[in-house]
Amino acid sequence: MRPEKQHRGVKKRPVNYCDPQVFFSAERSALSWNRTAITLMAFGFTIERFGFFMQLQQHAADSPMPKETTTMSYWVGLVFILLGALFSSLAAWQFRSIVNTMDTSELPRGYQIHMPFFVNLIVAIIAAAMAFFLLGTFVHDITNGTSSPPA
């Protein structure tokens, strides 16, 4: 039996070698998805509030404006906010599943390994709360007759 060849420039690592790059790569990915989710939420909120702004402009100018414009901006904005919640939830789930596949020797000692999971989870909860708040506002406007129902 031949001894294993060592490739040029590549050193063999001991069996109990801990490479923290795998964990930190998963953490960076989770936080990148978190950043994407927050951006989607902010964009959705901006779109939704732009429809509200257009509604205020309509009342101030006493000019007729199609109600579908404000209704459409509401639904598009709400979809972006819900996408942000979905992406943040998926990022939390993916990070947790990656960490669960790692051996305890592969995780950095003394490091808060669950922080990206909780950050993504909190962002998802905030996005869901924001979506329910906007939905409640829209339903309240419909029941009071200040807005048109969705087309």
Image (cartoon, helix red, strand yellow):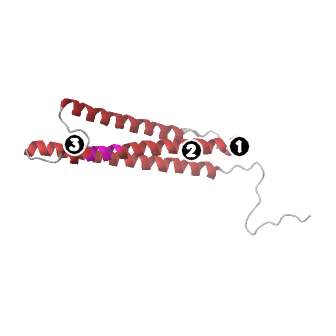
**Quarter of the rendering containing residue 57:** top left
Q: What residue is drawn where x is 79% and y is 66%?
A: 6
Q: Around disc 3, counting alpha carbons within 10 Å, would you say few (fewer than 14), some (14 to 19), or many (20 or more)?
A: some
- Choose between 71 and 125: the one closer to the eye: 71
Q: Around disc 2, counting alpha carbons within 10 Å, would you say few (fewer than 14), some (14 to 19), or many (20 or more)?
A: many
Q: Is residue 133 left or right of residue 24?
A: left
Q: State the CA–CA distance, disc 3 to disc 2.
A: 37 Å
Identify the magenta region: 72-78
Which quadrant: the C terminus? top left
> Mark 3 — residue?
52
Q: Amino acid at mark 2?
A: Phe
Q: Is residue 101 above or below residue 5?
A: above
> Mark 2 — residue?
95
Q: Amino acid at mark 3?
A: Phe
Q: State the CA–CA distance, disc 1 to disc 2.
A: 17 Å
Q: What residue is drawn where x is 64% and y is 49%?
A: 20
Q: Is residue 20 magenta?
A: no
